[in-house]
Image (cartoon, rainbow, N blue to C red):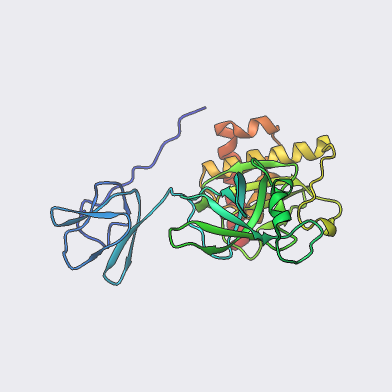
């Protein structure tokens, strides 16, 4: 593992100049001008606007805020998320989705097995644990955002629901690229759900979809060795891309998978191999864009 020569980056000395200061760390003075409004991620210190988090300075008219580089998931309506059930409550489930507060999945916001659409009765409330219990993983969509910032989820479409056999990879939400669809069947033989909250779910591509189950049928048949190897390789590729801060979407994951094929699965996580694979992936992405 040979040391590489790192380029020296010259930092701007003018801390008070707002235009030349894009990235800040806690305690950095953003501006000493009093004509600006204080936004998120900033505080006033001796009449100077100072950053309270490490991130990028954003300016909208007179409002200055700092967007953190590493943060919890801030959900928006329509986001696809992968979450884990943490609690079964009255007419609702609590779901861990990597956000500041637990998300809520209401009993009225799920498809019951069989897919029938009807009012949820007291009997359905008593059998809630049969559909989802603590520790179960689900894919869902953000339906609304409560006033305190908690997310309300729904699984009213057949593409959402309980997740069966597969691997969960937890990454930073900032690495997931927003796309039209976050469900991909990759040509290498596995499927992927790229949750906007940074939780990525890898699973073997299902042969046929059981429409009757309403998204709550989970196959517990043994997964073949070839499928397990593909999923393990994809998992290590995701960790490699995450470590080098490459945006995750179907094309970048597939290019990384193809670049890793000459190496063994366990070798992908070695720093020198990781760097080589990510460099080849970036090169392919640049060629694609060019």
- Residue furthest to the front in view is 122
- In the picture, measured across the screen, residue 230 lies left or right of residue 169, that is right
Of 283 and 118, the residue lying toward us: 118
Q: Is residue 261 visible?
A: no
Residue at (28% x, 48% y) in the render: 11
Q: Give x and y (percent) for residue 174.
A: 50, 53
Say which quadrant the C terminus sits in: bottom right
Q: Give x and y (percent) for residue 136.
A: 67, 43
Q: Give x and y (percent) for residue 238.
A: 61, 43
In this rendering, the answer to whether 109 lies above or below 187 is below
- In the picture, measured across the screen, residue 252 lies left or right of residue 215, that is left
Q: Is residue 246 visible?
A: yes
In this rendering, the answer to whether 34 lies above or below 8 is below
- Residue furthest to the top in view is 1
Of 111 and 167, the residue lying toward us: 111
In this rendering, the answer to whether 17 lies above or below 242 is below
Q: Give x and y (percent) for residue 77.
A: 55, 65
Residue at (49% x, 56% y) in the render: 150
In this rendering, the answer to whether 160 lies above or below 7 is below
- In the picture, measured across the screen, residue 49 lies left or right of residue 82, that is left
Of 14 and 117, the residue lying toward us: 117
- Residue furthest to the left in view is 46
Res. 212 image quadrant: bottom right
How many discs appear?
A: 0
């Amino acid at each position: 593992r040979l040391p590489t020569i790192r380029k020296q980056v010259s930092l701007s000395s003018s801390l008070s100049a707002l235009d030349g200061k894009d990235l800040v760390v806690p305690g950095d003075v953003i501006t000493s001008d009093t004509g600006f409004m204080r936004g998120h991620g900033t505080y006033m210190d001796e009449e100077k606007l100072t950053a309270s988090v490490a991130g990028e300075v954003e300016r909208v008219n007179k409002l200055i805020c700092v967007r953190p580089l590493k943060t919890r998931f801030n959900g928006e309506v329509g986001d696809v998320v992968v979450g884990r059930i943490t609690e079964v409550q009255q007419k609702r489930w609590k779901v861990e989705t990597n956000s500041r507060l637990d998300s809520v999945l209401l009993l009225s916001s799920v498809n019951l097995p069989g897919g029938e659409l009807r009012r949820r009765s007291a009997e359905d409330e008593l059998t809630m644990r049969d559909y989802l219990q603590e520790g179960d993983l689900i894919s869902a969509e953000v339906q609304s955002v409560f006033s305190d910032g908690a997310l309300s989820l729904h699984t009213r479409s057949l593409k959402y629901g309980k997740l069966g056999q597969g691997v969960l990879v937890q990454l930073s939400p900032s690495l997931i690229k927003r796309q039209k669809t976050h469900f991909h069947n990759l040509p290498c033989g596995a499927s992927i759900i790229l949750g906007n909250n940074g939780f990525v779910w890898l699973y073997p591509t299902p042969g046929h979809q059981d429409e009757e189950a309403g998204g709550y049928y989970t196959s517990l048949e043994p997964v073949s060795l070839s499928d397990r190897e593909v999923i393990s390789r994809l998992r290590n590729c995701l960790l490699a891309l995450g470590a080098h801060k490459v945006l995750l979407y179907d094309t970048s994951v597939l290019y990384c998978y193809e670049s890793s094929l000459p190496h063994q699965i366990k070798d992908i996580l070695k720093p020198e191999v990781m760097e080589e694979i990510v460099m080849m992936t970036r090169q392919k992405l640049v060629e694609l864009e060019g």
